[in-house]
Structures are given as structure tokens and as C-alpha cells.
Image (tube, helix red, strand yellow):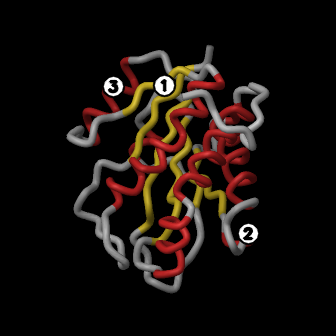
Amino acid sequence: MPKVYLDPSVDETSEYISGGNEEYYMNLIVDAMVPFLNTAGIQFTRNNPGDTLNDILDQSNAGNYDLHFSLRSTPAPAVQQGPIIYYNPLSPNGQNAAYDTARNLWSIYPIPSLVAMVPNSTLSQIALTKAPTVLVDLVNRANPEDTQWLKDNIYRIGRMLALSLTEYFNIPIDVRREPFM
């Protein structure tokens, strides 16, 4: 059974232009993912909102995880839009998981061409975790269209991110059906 370390942001100081903060929304998305992961039989550990980055890295590295899956939002100028999926270019598994994630976000993001995959080996979650890592900046928190899309599609985003994990682990699941609760 695959094991994932779920790492929704613990940053409650990063405010969204339309209200709320990064920690709140990334945790709502993970909440939406959980029933699908349970139905698929994917075991997971989830960070705690009070954890520091060092706590998260230590917890991830202390476990025997097949993937570290991190959710954030980008603090870019308001003109930038779209999800950015970061992965380690030296990790074929991380790149495969990033591609599955990007492909599923392409299917639901209003402007699919703005969904980007970016190799990166310097972000802490990517550089300092043992498991292959995908870090997803779902939206630009300074862009009103991005933040509204996120707020209007929390469940749908969670569903598609869970589908990304089931595809990565080659677990057949029909995400059009409601999961077992």
C-alpha cells in the first residue's frame, strides 16, 4: 500500500487578496482529498498546522513515504496566474507525479496553458526530503481570478489531486463516484 506525506501549507500569514489565508485553503483542499485517498487505500500522514518547516521535513524523512505532496500558493505579482507544479529534475518518480498532477489540473483550470511544471532542486521540501516530492503552488494569492477559482472549486481540486495520486500509484479509482465516508 502506498504511503504519502501530505503537506498542506502551515503559513497562516500569507493572506489571499479576496480574504482568507494559505494555511486555511490548502487544508480545505487536503480535507477534500482525504475521502478519495481512503477509498483508494492510500495511507497518508498529514502535517499539523502548528508544525514548522523543520518539523515537517523531520516527520517526512522519519517515515518510509513513497511521495511527499506539498500544497502552497505563490506570492507573485498579481498578473501571474495558474498553478505551478515543482519537482526535482533528478527524480524520475517526482517528475512522473508532477506530470500526473499537472495533467489533472489542466483538465479543470480555466486556462490550461497557464498550468506549468517547473524543475527545481532548491525548494526545501524538494531538496531536503528523502521521498520524491511534488510541490504544487495552486494559485497566485495576489491574483483575484486565481483565488476566486480556488474558492469556487475546493472539492473539485481536491478530487483531481487525489486522482493524480491514484494515477501515480497505478490504483484504479473512478473519481466521478463519491468516495466511501
Q: Is residue 65 above or below residue 142?
A: above
Q: Quadrant of the C terminus?
A: top right
Secondary structure at badge 2 equals helix
Q: CA distance from mark 2 to mark 3?
A: 34 Å
Q: Is residue 101 above or below residue 62?
A: below
Residue 112's disc number: 2
Point out the tag, 1 or 2, that comes first from the N-terminus. 1
Residue 53's disc number: none
Q: Amino acid at mark 3?
A: Gln
Q: Amino acid at mark 2?
A: Pro
Q: Nearer the viewer, mark 2 or mark 3?
A: 2
- Decide which of 122, 3 is in the foreground and name it: 3
Q: Position of residue 34 (x, y in %)?
A: 51, 34
Judge the density around disc 1: few (<14), some (14-19), many (≥20) Cα neighbours within 10 Å. Answer: some
Which residue is under mark 3? 59
Secondary structure at badge 1 equals strand
Point out the tag, 2 or 3, that comes first from the N-terminus. 3
Which residue is under mark 1? 44
Residue 95 in which image quadrant: top right
Judge the density around disc 2: few (<14), some (14-19), many (≥20) Cα neighbours within 10 Å. Answer: some
